[in-house]
Amino acid sequence: MEDFGIRNYYERYVMDEINHTLRSSGKITEKQLALDIACLALNQLPPKYVRHDIDTTFYMSPEERGDVESKVAAAVAGAYQKVIANPGRA
């Protein structure tokens, strides 16, 4: 299948949040847990497909960017709690 360069806008933000908040603090060390958390978090966020992150971010107001950051943080925190409470079931 041809790669058209389209992806979910939230993917990078979710992975950044996981790396910054969970992995850097030592709360999770296994890549598989990070991936489980990412999948669960992304399923809690609305799909937003883009070709270039910078184009989307450039046209957002500061309030919209703050809303994205809050939604991502909440989705990752909820996914983390679910994965930790149910290891091996995510």
Image (cartoon, helix red, strand yellow):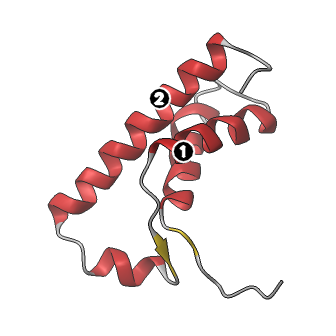
Q: Is residue 67 left or right of residue 82?
A: left
Instruction: Tell me the tag on residue 54.
Output: none
Q: Is residue 13 left or right of residue 83?
A: left
Quadrant in which the N terminus appears: bottom right
Farthest residue, direction front: 1
Q: Position of residue 69 (x, y in %)?
A: 34, 50
Residue at the location (68% across, 27% down)? 28
Quadrant in which the C terminus appears: top right
Farthest residue, direction top: 85
| Mark nearer the viewer, 2 or 1 | 1
Q: Amino acid at mark 2?
A: Ala
Q: Which residue is mark 2?
A: 77
Q: Amino acid at mark 1?
A: Asn
Q: Which residue is mark 1?
A: 43
Q: Is residue 21 above or below residue 45?
A: above
Give the CA separation, mark 2 to mark 1.
Answer: 13 Å
Who is closer to the viewer here, 32 or 29? 32
Q: Is residue 59 left or right of residue 43?
A: left
Residue at the location (44% across, 66% down)? 48
Q: Is residue 52 left or right of residue 34?
A: left
Residue at the location (24% across, 72% down)? 60
SS assignment at label 2: helix
SS assignment at label 1: helix
